[in-house]
């Protein structure tokens, strides 16, 4: 168990101090703004569920109000716990060889499979996916009710972190149906367990909705951002992004040990002691985790796949070793054992190179500091500051510059800009505060198509006073035109 903790600590340290990483503004600027009095879903608009950024906000007092340290500490903690659970469970269920190879897998592929994104939604959700898998693979007929209540609570919390976690409900229903068909449960008992599961699932969601209404009277706004916009399905159509072919084939190479693992379901004596039932559950959870790539591909989403890929790969290697010992060396099996040898070579190169030349570049955060230094010389010292178009690549400027946006912080993505009420609310916030400065970035995200009225508003009411060069782009500094009077929006 100490080796599992050591592996987790090593990988966590590497992702904080050796490897390139990313620090999303949802975990920096948004918690910073909430701490400054912004109200989630009223002053901060986003389709992301609330729990993760609130968790960072709650952790901030432990780190002198610093959301960066809070998020990085959370990242380190989640990685240690996730890897500890992976290696410990594999050792308990499939033995030393399987645990060793699973540990080697996480050491080699954590960077590719999404752990570079600091405390991101998918990484934290992967922990709940793994815990739910452990619960589903636990066979104890006497504690079915406890299993249903615990599972529902886990899924409810997971959905408050990332909406796609709702797929776990369908996995639980599949489990109930299988047990019902196998006559392990009666129809009445199955209905009772499903009701207990769904009731427990609703508890954390209802608690949040009631708390948001009680504390800030934002029930309607919460429903709008988390449910109404999702039902409009704008993200699925406007935000769709398929996996690049190179990434697809690279992922297939990483998951090549799925082949012998799947074969173990059909070859009776091909296995390391892990039951067929658990192997099927592993594949079910792996497929469910892959669905996180829909509708918009990002390598960050692979972190939900990460724990199940590690377990499956480790178990497959142990299966091969056991069969070779039992029946002698088979050429096809030896070929598969080249895979972990490749892992060793890759991991050694990766960590030795990182130790010699640390690349502690934090995308969406540290790369903004040179820009911030130039802006501080040229923008007014006080007043709010708007960024157009705001996206995840530039939003952390608000925290770095310690300058609040107008009290309607949004990203200018197409799936938000096709909603007129969101655009009107952003203009209304700027008008209400007479925001003195706008930083105008190159017009990405098709804002010319989806938000021409915002461009017209900025052009009519602001004038360019200077520019700053950053990453080959010209960032325009615009001040409010004192000679231009605009109609206030109530």
Image: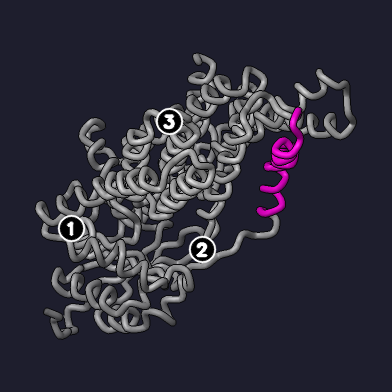
- The spot of residue 71 in percent (x, y) is 35, 39
Q: Image point 48% across, 38% down: which residue?
A: 184
Q: Image point 55% across, 32% down: which residue?
A: 358
In the image, 146: left or right of 233? left
Indicate the secondary structure of the residue bearing disc 1: loop
Nearest the camera: 430 or 311?
311
Indicate the secondary structure of the residue bearing disc 3: helix
Spatial distance from mark 1 to mark 3, Cα to Cα?
Answer: 64 Å
Instruction: Read off the magenta span.
Output: 247-269
Between circles 1 and 2, the one closer to the viewer is 2
State the residue position of label 1.
382
Between discs 2 and 3, the one toward the N terminus: 3
Spatial distance from mark 2 to mark 3, Cα to Cα?
Answer: 38 Å
Asked if residue 27 can be seen in this view, the reply is no
- The spot of residue 107 in percent (x, y) is 60, 29
Magenta span contains residue 259: yes
Q: Is the magenta stretch mostly helix, strand or loop?
A: helix
State the residue position of label 2.
295
- The spot of residue 236 in percent (x, y) is 47, 69
- The spot of residue 485 in percent (x, y) is 15, 84
State the residue position of label 3.
141
């Amino acid at each position: 168990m100490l080796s599992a903790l050591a592996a987790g600590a090593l990988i966590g340290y590497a992702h904080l101090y050796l490897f390139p990483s990313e620090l999303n503004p949802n975990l920096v600027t948004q918690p910073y703004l909430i701490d400054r009095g912004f109200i989630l879903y009223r002053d901060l608009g986003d389709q992301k569920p609330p729990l993760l950024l609130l968790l960072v906000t709650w952790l901030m007092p432990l780190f002198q109000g610093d959301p960066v340290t809070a998020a990085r500490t959370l990242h380190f903690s989640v990685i240690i716990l996730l890897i500890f659970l992976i290696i410990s469970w594999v050792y308990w269920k499939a033995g030393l060889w399987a645990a060793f190879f699973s540990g080697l897998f996480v050491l080699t592929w954590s960077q590719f499979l999404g752990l570079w994104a600091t405390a991101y939604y998918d990484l934290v959700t992967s922990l709940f996916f793994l815990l739910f898998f452990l619960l589903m693979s636990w066979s104890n007929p006497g504690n079915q009710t406890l299993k249903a209540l615990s599972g529902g609570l886990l899924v409810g919390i997971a959905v408050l972190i990332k909406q796609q976690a709702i797929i776990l409900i369908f996995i639980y229903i599949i489990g109930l149906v299988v047990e019902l068909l196998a006559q392990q449960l009666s129809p009445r008992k199955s209905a009772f367990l499903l009701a207990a599961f769904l009731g427990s699932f609703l508890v954390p969601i209802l608690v949040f909705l009631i708390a948001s209404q009680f504390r800030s009277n934002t029930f309607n706004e919460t429903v709008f951002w988390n449910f109404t916009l999702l039902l409009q399905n704008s993200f699925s159509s406007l935000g769709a992004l398929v996996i690049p072919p190179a990434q697809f084939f690279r992922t297939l190479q990483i998951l090549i040990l799925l082949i012998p693992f799947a074969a173990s379901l059909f070859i009776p004596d091909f296995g390391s002691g892990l039951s067929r039932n658990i192997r099927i559950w592993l594949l079910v959870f792996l497929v469910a985790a892959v669905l996180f790539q829909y509708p918009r591909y990002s390598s960050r989403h692979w972190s939900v796949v990460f724990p199940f890929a590690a377990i499956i790969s480790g178990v497959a290697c142990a299966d091969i070793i056991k069969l070779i010992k039992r029946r002698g060396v088979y050429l096809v099996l030896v070929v598969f054992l080249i895979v972990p040898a490749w892992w060793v070579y890759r991991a050694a190169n990766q960590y030795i190179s990182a130790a010699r030349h640390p690349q502690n570049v934090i995308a969406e955060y540290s790369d903004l500091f040179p820009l911030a230094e130039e802006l501080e010389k040229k923008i007014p010292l006080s007043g709010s500051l708007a960024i157009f178009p705001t996206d995840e690549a530039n939003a952390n400027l608000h925290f770095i510059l310690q300058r609040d946006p107008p009290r309607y912080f949004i990203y200018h993505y197409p799936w938000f800009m096709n909603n007129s009420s969101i655009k009107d609310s952003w203009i209304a916030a700027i008008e209400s505060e007479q925001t003195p400065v706008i930083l105008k970035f190159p017009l990405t995200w098709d804002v010319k198509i989806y938000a021409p009225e915002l461009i017209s508003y900025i052009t009519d009411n602001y004038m360019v006073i200077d520019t700053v060069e950053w990453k080959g782009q010209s960032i325009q500094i615009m001040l409010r035109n004192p000679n231009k009077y605009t109609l206030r929006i109530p």
